[in-house]
């Protein structure tokens, strides 16, 4: 579904070029959930923004579903790929109702049956149709993020790019949103690329993980290796060691087992 080859992104910092992402290459299969982890400033969110077409100043090669993507994406790209942002408080227009938020991308892409599409999007994220005419300030953080996910689903994309989708939420609400994303991926056959600093989130959601440091993709490992604490690169081992003794449980949905990440020297 996604092929990224030699992706590089350079910014100007105090008048001098700063290479935030350097020659990153990875591939994501259709239906896979792929995680990107690393400390703040490692370049993981910059990679995601380049994938989403929000940063057009990149070099390399990017292919989605067999189509090579230019820096300036065609409108059709956004029917294939949508992004869910970290902050549900900042990503929704404060003066737009939920209905307008969901219907606007449909209008931009000239889709018909908007009433039914809005209702279907709300159903997908577990919100009743009574939410149609509420404003963001009338919603909880978890409800706002559900609306943001519904907006991303409004165009029926095949790929969701998720930038720290639960980090701004309370822990109990995080579990609900993660379980929702897991269900949506299974029900709709979606492909995910997830950026997170939380190893438990990545272990719960992903099959493979890319580890980034200072703009470089230093290691790629399976989630089984992540859970077991097996890593080849010194930075990845340090990342795991920094969570030594810390166990974070992700609350499962009904019928699932609880997944815990234990990253200790003995695991």
Image (spheres, rainbow, N blue to C red):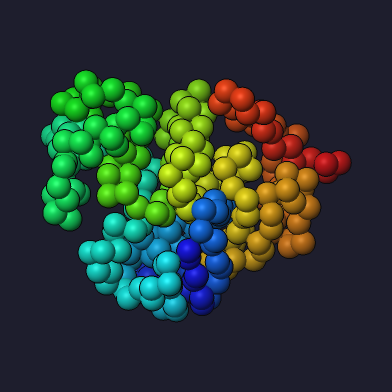
Q: Is residue 263 left or right of residue 54?
A: right
Image quarter where the C terminus lies is top right
Q: Where on the picture, by quarter, is residue 77?
A: bottom left
Q: Residue furthest right?
A: 266
Looking at the image, can residue 159 be seen? Answer: yes
Residue 19 visible in this rendered orientation of the protein? no
Total number of numbered discs in the rendering: 0
What is the x, y in percent for residue 200?
Answer: 62, 39
Where residue 215 appears, x then y in whole percent?
53, 66
Please give the name of the residue rendered at 42% of the width and 35% of the height, measured from the top-left corner: 168
Whether residue 220 is situated above or below residue 130 in the rendered picture: below
Q: Quadrant of residue 65?
A: bottom left
Residue found at x 73% / y 62%: 233
Q: Residue at x 70, y 44 (%)?
A: 242
Is 238 left, or right, of 158 in this rendering? right
Foreground: 41 or 248? 248
Residue at left offset 55%, top offset 66%: 27
Is 169 left or right of 121, judged from the image as shown? right
Q: Position of residue 114 (x, y in %)?
A: 16, 41
């Amino acid at each position: 579904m996604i092929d990224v080859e030699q992706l590089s992104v350079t910014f100007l910092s105090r008048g001098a070029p700063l290479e935030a992402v350097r020659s990153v290459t990875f591939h994501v299969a259709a239906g896979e959930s792929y995680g990107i982890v690393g400390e703040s400033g490692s370049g993981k969110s910059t990679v995601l923004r380049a994938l989403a077409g929000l940063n057009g100043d990149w070099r390399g090669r990017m292919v989605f579903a067999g189509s090579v993507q230019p820096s300036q994406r065609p409108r059709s790209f956004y029917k294939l790929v949508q992004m869910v942002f970290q902050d549900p408080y900042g990503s929704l227009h404060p003066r737009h109702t939920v209905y307008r938020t969901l219907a606007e991308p449909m209008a931009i892409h000239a889709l018909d049956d908007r009433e039914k599409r809005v209702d279907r999007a709300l159903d997908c994220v577990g919100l009743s149709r009574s939410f149609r005419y509420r404003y963001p300030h009338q919603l909880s953080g978890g409800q706002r993020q559900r609306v943001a996910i519904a907006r991303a689903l409004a165009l029926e994309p095949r790929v969701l790019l998720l930038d720290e989708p639960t980090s701004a939420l309370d822990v109990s609400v995080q579990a609900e949103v993660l379980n929702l994303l897991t269900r949506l991926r299974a029900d709709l056959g979606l492909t995910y690329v997830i950026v997170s600093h939380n190893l438990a989130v990545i272990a719960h959601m992903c099959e493979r993980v890319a580890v980034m440091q200072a703009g470089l993709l230093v290691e790629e490992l399976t989630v089984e290796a992540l859970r077991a604490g097996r890593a080849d690169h010194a930075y990845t081992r340090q990342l795991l060691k920094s969570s030594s003794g810390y166990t974070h449980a992700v609350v499962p949905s009904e019928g699932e087992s609880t997944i815990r990440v234990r990253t200790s020297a003995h695991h």
